[in-house]
């Protein structure tokens, strides 16, 4: 990919004086490698009656917790995934000014103290990761209650201050479980959903609980929990049978659907842990289009985008995004890839 100029969105669009659905949206066409510049509220204009939009209704957790090591070392712990048997996958980070950075060293003891009498007990590093640990939580309240009182949304250095949890929730979120926001859906508003339905574009849900970003350590995505309901699988197959497009809202939707699609491109209901990594060599078989954010060149998400869009269109899109000053990350602009 050619060198791109990254302009980071440092605050939500509402703080910049615009609505969620007023962020910019580049529309990139696979059939002829053309692009157009629009806004997220224009999404119904670029979809056809009978098309089907698939959303991820996982809700964002207040998954960042302040902690102290056994020697008093200050840490920030990101709860990444709830694992079977009462275990959690957690990421250790060290405070660094207004942000944090990964903690790659051995931890300052196996037990970390939390605010309000809680503890995190580290059991073992997760596979070959230098920053992720399998742990148990000992909390005085249920996890969601404890996080509501003591947690805050995960924030990286390009966002200069903390924002309330509802800033990181999609309007259609129903089931808390994601460490980080499935942010491609953030531009959706009730009005936008209404306009899609009024045009005859279907909207159907699934769930994939996202973990912490793999960007900083250049790691492949690790397993995440998902559920594709029977009704969603049926609607996808029906849309395909009638020659309509299936458009994923976010890479999380693509990962979930690629976990249950067969060789004939039939999508099945299913749930569990997925370790699917979509690459250009593997290909993407369950969707025809994708609405996504803007990702760094080293991000694993770009392999998925290349599988869906192809390298030539991706190069054209990212060059245009750089030239036109599109904003990146969860509070930034979006990229619609369609036939």
Image (cartoon, rainbow, N blue to C red):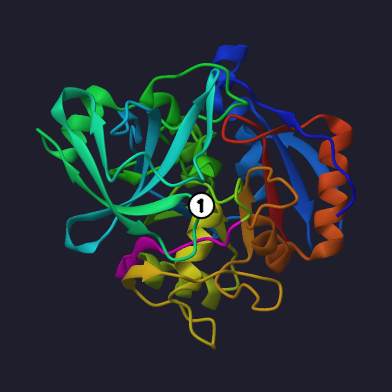
Where's residue 280, x and y in %? Answer: 71, 72
Foreground residue among 263 and 131:
131
Residue found at x 61% / y 33%: 41
Q: Residues within 10 Å of mark 1 (few under 14, many from 20)?
A: some
Where's residue 222, x and y in %? Answer: 47, 62
145 displayed left or right of 214: left
Q: Residue furthest front?
A: 71
Position of residue 235 relative to residue 58, above or below, is below
Position of residue 202 relative to residue 19, above or below, is below
Quadrant in the picture for the C terminus: bottom right
Position of residue 140 relative to residue 319, above or below, is above
What range is drawn magenta here?
219-231
Number of numbered discs: 1
82 displayed left or right of 294: left
Residue 282, located in which quarter of the rendered image? bottom right
Residue found at x 75% / y 50%: 297
Foreground residue among 178 and 70:
70
Quadrant in the picture for the N terminus: bottom right
Is any atom of residue 163 visible in this view? Answer: yes
Q: Which residue is mark 1?
A: 200
As for residue 51 lying within the magenta part, the answer is no
């Amino acid at each position: 990919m050619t060198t791109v100029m990254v302009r980071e969105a440092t605050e939500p669009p509402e703080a910049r004086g615009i609505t969620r659905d007023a962020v910019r949206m580049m529309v990139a066409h696979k059939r002829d490698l053309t692009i157009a510049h629009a806004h997220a509220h224009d999404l119904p204009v670029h979809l056809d009656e009978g098309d089907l939009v698939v959303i991820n209704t996982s809700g964002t957790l207040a998954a960042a917790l302040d902690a102290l090591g056994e020697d008093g070392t200050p840490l920030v712990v990101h709860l990444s995934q709830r694992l079977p048997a009462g275990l959690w996958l957690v990421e250790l980070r060290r405070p660094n000014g207004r942000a944090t950075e990964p903690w790659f060293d051995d931890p300052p003891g196996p037990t970390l103290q939390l605010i309000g009498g809680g503890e995190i007990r580290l059991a073992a590093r997760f596979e070959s990761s230098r920053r992720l640990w399998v742990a148990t939580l000992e909390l005085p309240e249920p996890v969601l209650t404890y996080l509501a009182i003591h947690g805050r949304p995960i924030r990286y250095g390009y966002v200069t201050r903390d924002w309330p949890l509802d800033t990181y929730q999609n309007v259609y979120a129903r089931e808390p479980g994601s460490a980080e926001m499935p942010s491609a859906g953030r531009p959706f508003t009730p009005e936008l959903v209404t306009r899609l339905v009024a045009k005859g574009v279907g909207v159907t849900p699934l769930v994939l609980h996202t973990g912490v970003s793999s960007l900083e350590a250049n790691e492949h995505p690790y397993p995440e929990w998902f559920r594709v309901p029977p009704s969603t699988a049926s609607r996808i197959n029906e849309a395909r049978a009638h020659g309509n497009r299936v458009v994923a809202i976010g890479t999380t939707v693509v990962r979930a659907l690629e976990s249950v699609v067969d060789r004939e491109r039939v999508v099945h209901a299913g749930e569990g842990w997925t370790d699917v990594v979509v690459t250009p060599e593997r290909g993407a078989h369950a969707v025809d289009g994708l609405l996504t954010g803007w990702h760094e060149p080293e991000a694993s998400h770009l392999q998925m985008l290349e599988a869906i869009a192809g390298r030539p269109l991706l190069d054209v899109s990212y060059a245009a995004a750089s030239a036109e000053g599109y904003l990146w990350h969860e509070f930034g602009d979006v990229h619609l890839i369609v036939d």
